[in-house]
Image (spheres, grey):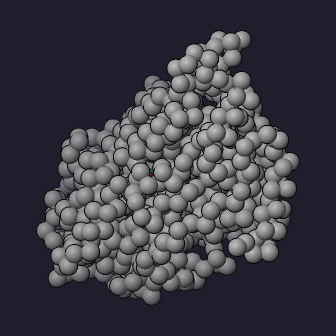
Amino acid sequence: MKTKSGLGRRAALLIGISAFAVQSYASEPTEVPQQPEFPAQGKITYVPRDSILEFKALPEYKEPAWVTENFVKTGKLPSVAERLPKEPMVFKTGNAPDGVGVYGDTMRHVIGGRPEGWNYSAGQTQGWGGIDIGMSECLTRTAPLFQIEAKDMEPLPNLAKSWSWSDDGKVLTMKLVKGAKWSDGDPFDSEDIMFYWEDNVLDSNVTPLNAASPETFGTGTTLKAIDKYTIEWTFKESFPRQHLYAMAYGTFCPGPAHILKTKHPKYNKDMTYEQYKNGWPADFMNMPVMGAWAPVAYRPDDIIVLRRNPYYWKVDEAGNQLPYLNELHYKLSTWADRDVQTIAGSADFSNLEQPENFVESLKRAAEETAPARLAFGPRVIGYNLYLNFSGNGWGEPDARGQAIRELNRNLDFRKAVTMALDRKALGESLVKGPFTAIYPGGLSSATSFYDRASTVYYPFDVEGAKALLEKLGLKDTDGNGFVNFPADKGGKDVEIVMLGNSDYTTDKSLAEGVIGQMEKLGIRVVLNSLDGKQFDASRYSGRYDWMVMRNEAERASVVQDTPELAATGPRTSDHHRAPEGGQLDLMPFEQELVDTVNTFIASSDDAERANLMKQYQKVVTANLDTIGLTEYPGALIINKRFANIPVGAPIFMFNWAEDTIIRERVFVPQDKQADFELFEETLPGKPGVGEGPAS
Ligand code: BQZ
């Protein structure tokens, strides 16, 4: 029985929506059904923001004994104190679940991606799964914020050790960590920051990984270096604290300017942008990093090995230079195999994100002899069906494609599609049980900004959907079971090409489910299933009609990658960008979303921000900006020998768990250490010098 307020709320919602409504669709939009309870395991202890880390000098520093013996005493490296900044980042012991750690051992990852090369700034992928996260350091850090109290929420310092705002809130001055070095000993300073900003983000010939564009940091924002360790942002708005999130992983993680400049066309006239992007292929070893580990070995389709960075600029409160783990492995396999190997004990870490593996993983983890711990978190994984909204040429569609985009831009067509989806069946096709939930699109139910009363859901109603298609003049005139365009539009079957990511079983399962359910509606959908690299290339270039894609951080956290919640810039949205040299042809509701998101970004008032996200959620779900499919919880699977794993760490929120668990602070107690290291007592060598580390 609905409570008074429930009925009131629902009625208000419906009245609110009737402004969008057309008179004759078969089903009234309603509130999305209450989700089945799913108790996340592992209770998060919320802590103050300043209880995690600080920057300060310590009386003495330590390093693994073999580094001293093999490298310092032999003159190959300066002392650890000379390799560290005057004030390194210090992780506070009180926030480390198991306190100060010990050196040794390896974390063995398995991934489904493959490394293109090491030029992250120019958009090369390293295969995902945390490789780039382990090698890159960014101005701020947000993944560990999952444990921070809401009232204290602000990105953590990282390469930017501190910052201050001008009185009018339009100038943000940032102090960089002073005296930190790249893993090859080259000093880190504002030259690296400005090279990333000016010659990668602002240079339209370059698309950094995770698609950082000028609008990511606010339209009209400028950045300049004041001195080697001071940078200054100038914004159009006052106190746009939101942009501090964009300065975290994956949108502001500078590369080694001393290496990258040698092949950037602005500094080397013999180079093309293509040669710049591909200048450091995957077999280029020892690429200098600011991260805790650098790549020292790569065998295609087999493994990437990374070794500890001797200049890493972070320590624990006892002065031990981090990381504790000497080595990372990245076995090059499939994402599904990552679950299987981790639960079996031949790998150490997985984000259990494919429901097809839930039951088997749960069974194995429940056994006494299970080598790995498994802990489910909130329903942070979601999938949407994206319809390409560009009506003016993004992705260069042919006549057929253009006609589909015009249908995509029609709300009645989108209502027909959403009402033809049996989301309960879609979820159960992945896994039976309390895991999956009906997800109409918009914000993830796991984010604190989620409001069910603001979430519009067009219920499953195939007949109602068919009636809407008929209203649009789409009828099966040739009796083959699929609706046709009207004769004056060629009379052909409505045929849609849907882009899918072949790296994941779940993406394929959902795509096949959508195809089957669209067939019952009378729409022919053909799957174009591409591997992650080609999928991303097609997605960013708009070469698709529809796309099934897993949610990214903006829907799971709202505050991370916020500009991507709407088409806030010409190259920001996943399903509506401007064509080469053209403009964005936004529909009125899209403009409303852009305005709402920009107002949210510019606001520092928590109550206002909460209301703006309710308004966003109502507009985005009532207008079917994307068509939600399903959402479900993920589980962190980690081998039991590791310590300092934060309890309740979600596999995905501000970022993935590879960042959230703070791997540089993870260790294996001496008595549990295994002998998995492949390059014991070695360190990364000279950039590009041969395969394998120096020793
Ligand atoms: C996690 C993640 C770490 C990218 C990638 C992959 C790419 C996308 C996304 C996830 C993988 C794992 O996700 O599935 O569990 O380890 O790497 O980066 O899906 O294709 O482009 O956004 O993060």
- Percent x, y for residue 243? 67, 58
Front position in the image: 562 or 620:
620
- In the picture, measured across the screen, residue 536 lies left or right of residue 152, that is left
Quarter of the image with the N terminus is: bottom right
**Residue sitting at x 53%, y 24%:** 481
Counting every numbered tag in the picture gives 0
**Residue sitting at x 81%, y 52%:** 17
Front position in the image: 69 or 469:
469
Front position in the image: 71 or 449:
449
Residue 401 to residue 141: above or below:
above
Q: Residue furthest left?
A: 675
- Percent x, y for residue 282? 31, 41
- Percent x, y for residue 516? 47, 37
- In the picture, measured across the screen, residue 326 lies left or right of residue 593, that is left
Residue 653 to residue 618: above or below:
below
Q: Is residue 121 visible?
A: no
**Residue sitting at x 40%, y 53%:** 430
Front position in the image: 586 or 49:
586
Quarter of the image with the C terminus is: bottom left
